[in-house]
Image (cartoon, rainbow, N blue to C red):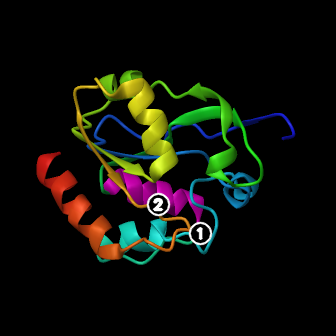
């Protein structure tokens, strides 16, 4: 461990209806200074594909996509110690203030990207009062990921949002 790492600010606006929460940015994401920066991560391909769109090439275009689709994006850990990109090494967590974010948005459904994010979320927000669902991580390290699971959850999320 080489000290506390800091994650990113949430991407949202007052019209956000669905929040997608990850655990903490990977090394590659931290290098490009935006969510899901590892080109092997399935996040952008999956979420953009659900809406029939190509993955935007720039951070600004990704932010525009999220705003147009009313998606907020954040990680449940604001700060932590982590070895590389390995969720199983996350410790000394400063948890994101998800409840405060909900007050600034129209979020009616939360998708939690992966097991570690779900573990941290449940420990801190099980009483949040908004429906939420754990999905398989979009990480390239996750061999159990399926696009169908995500498409089904996105359909439920936008049906409730």
- Picture quadrant where residue 57 is located: bottom right
Query: Does the image show residue 9?
Result: yes
Question: What segment is highlighted magenta in the picture?
Answer: 58-68
| 64 is within the stretch colored magenta | yes
Query: Does the image show residue 51?
Result: no
Residue at 68% x, 34% y: name it.
91
Q: Quadrant of the C terminus?
A: top left
Q: Residue furthest left?
A: 159
**Residue marked by disc 1:** 141
User: Helix or strand or loop: what does disc 1 sit on?
Assistant: loop
Residue 107 at x, y percent in the picture: 26, 37
Between residue 22 and residue 120, name the one nearer to us: 120
The majority secondary structure of the magenta stretch comes to helix
Q: Residue furthest right?
A: 2
**Residue marked by disc 2:** 137
32 vs 120: above or below: below
């Amino acid at each position: 461990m080489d000290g506390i790492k800091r994650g990113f600010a949430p991407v949202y606006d007052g019209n956000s209806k669905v929040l997608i929460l990850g655990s903490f940015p990977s090394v590659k994401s931290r290098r490009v200074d935006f969510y899901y920066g590892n080109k092997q991560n399935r996040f952008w391909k999956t979420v953009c594909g659900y809406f029939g769109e190509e993955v935007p090439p720039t951070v600004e275009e990704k932010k525009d996509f999220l705003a147009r689709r009313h998606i907020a994006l954040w990680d449940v850990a604001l700060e932590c110690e982590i070895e590389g990109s390995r969720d199983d090494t996350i410790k000394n967590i400063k948890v994101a203030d998800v409840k405060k974010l909900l007050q600034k948005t129209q979020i009616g459904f939360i998708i939690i990207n992966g097991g570690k994010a779900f573990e941290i979320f449940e420990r801190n927000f099980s009483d949040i009062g908004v429906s939420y669902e754990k999905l398989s991580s979009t990480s390239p390290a996750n061999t159990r990921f399926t696009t169908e699971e995500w498409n089904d959850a996105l359909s439920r999320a936008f049906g409730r949002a």
